[in-house]
Image (cartoon, coloured by chain):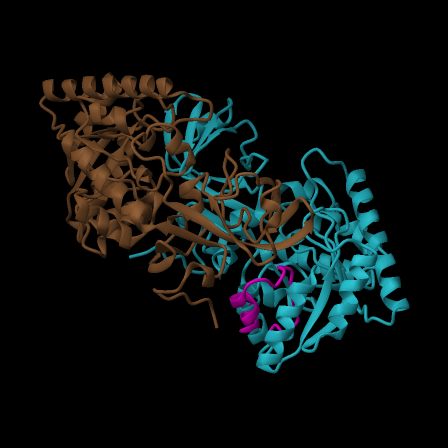
Chain colours: A brown, B cyan
Amino acid sequence: MNTVVLPGDPKSEVQTPALCLNLDSFEANLQRTASAVRAAGKQWRPNSKSHQSLDIAKRLIHAGAIGLTCGCVAEAQIFATQSIRDLLITQLPVGNRRIRQLAELCKIADPIATCDHYVQAEALSQECQRQGVRCRALVEINVGLERTGARPGRDTIELARGIDRLPGLILSGIMGIEGNRVPGESIEDIDRKMGAASGILAHSRDIFLQNGLCCGIVSGVGTDSFPQGLRSESLTEIQAGSILFRDEPTSKSASRHDASPTLTLLSTVISRPGFERAVLDAGTDWLAAGTATPTIKDWPDARVLRQYAEHLVLELGPCSRELRIGDQVELTIPHLAATVALHRQFLGFRQHQLEAVWPIFTRSFSG
Amino acid sequence: MNTVVLPGDPKSEVQTPALCLNLDSFEANLQRTASAVRAAGKQWRPNSKSHQSLDIAKRLIHAGAIGLTCGCVAEAQIFATQSIRDLLITQLPVGNRRIRQLAELCKIADPIATCDHYVQAEALSQECQRQGVRCRALVEINVGLERTGARPGRDTIELARGIDRLPGLILSGIMGIEGNRVPGESIEDIDRKMGAASGILAHSRDIFLQNGLCCGIVSGVGTDSFPQGLRSESLTEIQAGSILFRDEPTSKSASRHDASPTLTLLSTVISRPGFERAVLDAGTDWLAAGTATPTIKDWPDARVLRQYAEHLVLELGPCSRELRIGDQVELTIPHLAATVALHRQFLGFRQHQLEAVWPIFTRSFSG
């Protein structure tokens, strides 16, 4: 009785709201990104947050990604079931259950934990010993985002020395996240932020090496600073992941080599309560707007006037006034990862024909 | 390997972030709300959006709700599997698949469709005839929210006459939603809005009856206008549902008889990067803040400084500076329905002991 879509179906037959992926653009973005990372002599460990999909993860690995960056252990476990072994987990290991899960993951994959305090590393070390496994660990350094991360300099090096001595852990390097572009920030601001982060990471790596500590991995770089990250001397690997999809903030800032978004929300006009007003069956239950507002593809004189959980109210211009109840429109996705988390599947289209249905496992559920 | 929580577990053993329901408060709210509706001589058809849970739906029916209000057909189908038959679907029936699903639902339940245009009713009528079923229908009236809904007066009555003549449909009354309180709006504003909506519904009902049209159902009233709704002369049934949970906007506005929130997000301190700063393992992936900011229970001098997808950064005062890595804190839920949609289950606690695990089916997935 539930909604069924089958490969071969035309877009017009899809029940809306639906998250639609343009497969041609996606594949082009994937090849272009993987080539750019390779040409820069880096490794690519894309953050899986922006897709939360096994199908997409497999395509990334196939295109040359060395592994994935995951927000939490539960997410990494899901990828490990698909034989993706090299999994960097950015969430600091705190809490008995989380640490137990992480140590268990070492039995089927080769995860990397991140720590910014000795108490996290110590607890993880104990659990790894108890389970008879060894887990790689990075020191997370605060490179300017002022969120998590050890202070650069003495705090970092002391923590690294501590981790290096802990049984069950393998000190493997450092990580630092410079943070995404915030509204109003220019590309120059991002450049500066990335420059500072790179400098801190390079300096930290040098101190690691001077102290005889392993620093094989220097990981960082989100999508917004992708071009700058490629040029960074210190980084060995790049986490940028949402670059494949080009949500609106992304296309506007750093990912300058292709601005066409691959994802849209397909929606239906369900009410036409006035001459200049149409109401769509989409809303914040299916489209996380964040700080931006979705725009309407192919109808430039229509704009989103108000957003409700289950409705978007459009103000129509002279052209878009011809929209009728039952017509489909496509909306751009202002906030990619948050929108993906609201959906169960990507519908992959080749032109206007459904070719692939890729389930989304929704990492927000995984704790 | 995944997170398992078992009844009897203490709160301290739960993997965070977790959505926690205080069962004592919830049960008290439920009885109080059901009694208030009964005492006002109305019927209660709570909106299921705020919980999306079969366990909770069954408890609402047990407490006296006549049925449920659902945002979409797919959601109603899920409740129908639990023998909840009287299901009002507020989403206008548009689109072949959606209309097909709705007609199919008539075979196992007794749904009510809402229409604001003849083209919706006509398509539904055709599909009902094709499937050999009859579906109840309400006219949705624009009572001031300026979203969906037919214009009061002649448009409404013409649409009602049209529906009344359509085979396969049973004209059953009217619905009008006055909308939730918006930030900055006073209780007096809500009173005025509800007064206007009630007046329009009463007038429409009178015209229905003068024209010999059935108007057995007059449905409306969200949580914010619950006390006013109880006093409304025209309404036969009340949709308020989130009143059971008391998120912050709700407790502040209309639901004056119990201000204690029942739901919190349990979270863990994962980093303590500075004297006045703690970082929690919660973030907008688990907590939809909307226009309000979560507050921290039991730590009044801690406040949320910045929100990220996977982290909340707290600024700590003199008392809360004692928070350490690994400590649990509970956050209030500023935006109830949007937060529930991000979770897989409610963990129901009696004091500090887990008693119930109630799955959430996440209606945003259901299209």
Please determine whether, in this image, residue B286 is positioned above or below residue B6.
above
Residue A237, picture quadrant: top left
Q: Residue furthest right?
A: B210
Name the one closer to the observer, A258 or A180. A258
Q: Residue at x 31, y 52 (%)?
A: A53
Q: Relative to B59, is A198 on the left or the right?
A: left
- Magenta segment, which residues? B79-101
Please determine whether, in this image, residue B62 is positioned above or below residue B92.
below
Q: Residue furthest bottom?
A: B132
- Residue B243 in the image: state x and y as whole percent: 67, 52
Q: Residue at x 46, y 22 (%)?
A: A184
Q: Relative to B229, is A65 on the left or the right?
A: left
Q: Residue at x 62, y 69 (%)?
A: B123
- Residue B174 in the image: state x and y as whole percent: 76, 62
Residue A338: tell me if it is visible: yes
| Total tally of numbered discs in the picture | 0
* Magenta-colored stretch includes residue B113: no
- Residue B19 in the image: state x and y as whole percent: 49, 49
- Residue A351 in the image: state x and y as whole percent: 35, 53
Name the one closer to the observer, A59 or B243. A59
Q: Relative to A192, is A154 on the left or the right?
A: left
Q: Residue at x 83, y 47 (%)?
A: B196
Please determine whether, in this image, residue A149 is positioned above or below residue B100.
above
* Magenta-colored stretch includes residue B84: yes
Please determine whether, in this image, residue B142 is positioned above or below residue B280.
below
Residue B125, picture quadrant: bottom right
Q: Relative to A84, is B34 on the left or the right?
A: right
Name the one closer to the observer, A183 or B249. A183
Name the one closer to the observer, A175 or A280. A280
